[in-house]
Amino acid sequence: GAVVTLTRGLAIEVAPFKIRVNAVNPVAAETGFMKGAVGVDKLPDEVRRQLVSTIPLGRLTEPRDVAEHLARARRENP
């Protein structure tokens, strides 16, 4: 997708300056936007099961998951 392509391109561009580039790109998250605009909380059970079956965690990502990942990455790579 666009985020991955942009991240790769920018990483190549700034690598000579020893700058790392990272991206966070959760695909399906349990957020207010996904509930309101997409209606993810109103999906029929079978559709929701199919969606969740494609996610390694076995559930939709929650904002807390992203925040914890970013905090851990920041601590490990100051």
Image: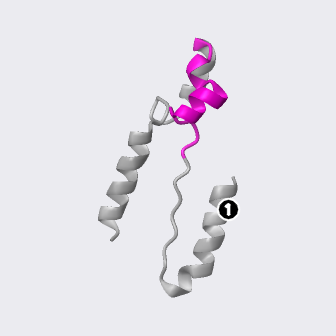
**Which residue is nearer to you in this view: 32 or 61?**
32
Q: Which quadrant: the C terminus?
A: bottom left
Question: Does residue 8 appear in this view?
Answer: yes
**Which residue is nearer to you in this view: 33 or 43?**
33
User: Extreme top residue here?
Assistant: 45
Q: Residue at x 37, y 60 (%)?
A: 73
- Residue occupied by mark 1: 5
Q: Is residue 4 magenta?
A: no
Q: Quadrant for residue 64, please give it.
A: top left
| Percent x, y of residue 38 | 65, 29
**Which residue is nearer to you in this view: 31 or 1?**
31
Mark 1 lies on a secondary structure that is: helix
User: Extreme bottom residue here?
Assistant: 17
The type of residue carrying mark 1 is Thr
* Figure check: 45 above or below 9: above
| Percent x, y of residue 58 | 46, 29
**Which residue is nearer to you in this view: 78 or 32?**
32
* Figure check: 40 above or below 11: above
* Figure check: 55 above or below 42: below
Q: Residue at x 65, y 30 (%)?
A: 37
Q: Residue at x 34, y 56 (%)?
A: 71
| Percent x, y of residue 12 | 61, 76
Q: Which residues are magenta?
A: 26-45
